[in-house]
Amino acid sequence: MGTFYPGPVNELWRRASRIGRPAEFDSKGTAASFECGVSVRVFVLVDEKGVLSSVRYVSNGCGWSVAAAEAATRLIEGKRLRDLHALDELESDICTVLGPVPDSRESCIAIAVEAVRDALAEYRRVRAAEWKGETALICSCFGVSEETIESLSASGEAETVEDIGDLCRAGTGCGSCQILIREIILEGLR
C-alpha cells in the first residue's frame, strides 16, 4: 500500500486499531465539520475506578481525520478521568503524534478533540441523571454529594479541593465542580 499522507499520519491511518463502534460503551460524543463533511463519533467505556477502559471511534473522514481520532483515542485510553485535566493538552498531544500539521488540516484534530469532549460531557450528564441521593450532586464524574464534601470538610480531614479529591475523588475528573467544592469548604469555615 502506498504512502498518501506524511509518515505518522499514514501509519495511523493504515493501522487504525480503535476504529469501529463497540458493543458496549457508557457514552458517545460526536463532532463534525461542515467545511468538508467529516464527522467523528467517539465511544467511551469507564470502569468502576474511573479509568477509560475502552475508547473507540468511527469516522467518515480522510486519513488526517482518522489519524487524529486514532491518536486521540490512544492518548486517553487507560487514563483515569481525574488525570485528563479537562483535556487541556489533548490537541497539542495529537499534533505531537502526527508531526507538523498544515493549517488546512487543523480542523481534523479539532473535530477529534471535540468528539472526545462531547463523549465525556455525555458521561457526566448520564451520571448526574442517574443520581438518586438526597442532597445535591456536586461531582457527577464520581457521584459525590454535597453532604459527603461537607462531612469531610467539617471533620477536618479535608481543608482544600485537593484534599477532597484525595479522599473521595470529587473534583479530579473533568474539574468543573472544583469551584463548588471550594465554596463548600469556605462555607464550612465560616
Image (cartoon, grey):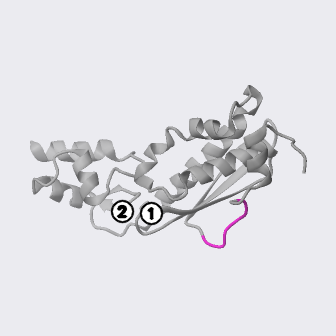
Answer whether residue 136 is visible to the viewer in this image.
no
Quadrant in which residue 3 is drawn: top right
Q: Is residue 21 magenta?
A: yes
Quadrant in which residue 102 is drawn: top right
> From which residue to which does the magenta span run?
19-24
In the picture shown, does residue 25 fall above or below 150? below
Residue found at x 73% / y 42%: 8
What residue is disc 2 on?
143
- Amino acid carrying mark 1 in the image: Arg
Image marks 1 and 2: residues in contact by CB distance under 8 Å: yes
Secondary structure found at label 1: helix
Residue that sits furthest to the top in the current view: 103
Residue 90 location, x and y as percent?
55, 41
Residue 127, numbered label? 1
Residue 14 location, x and y as percent?
80, 52
Among the two numbered marks 1 and 2 on one chain, the one whose residue lies closer to the N terminus: 1
Residue 81, numbered label? none
Residue found at x 57% / y 54%: 119
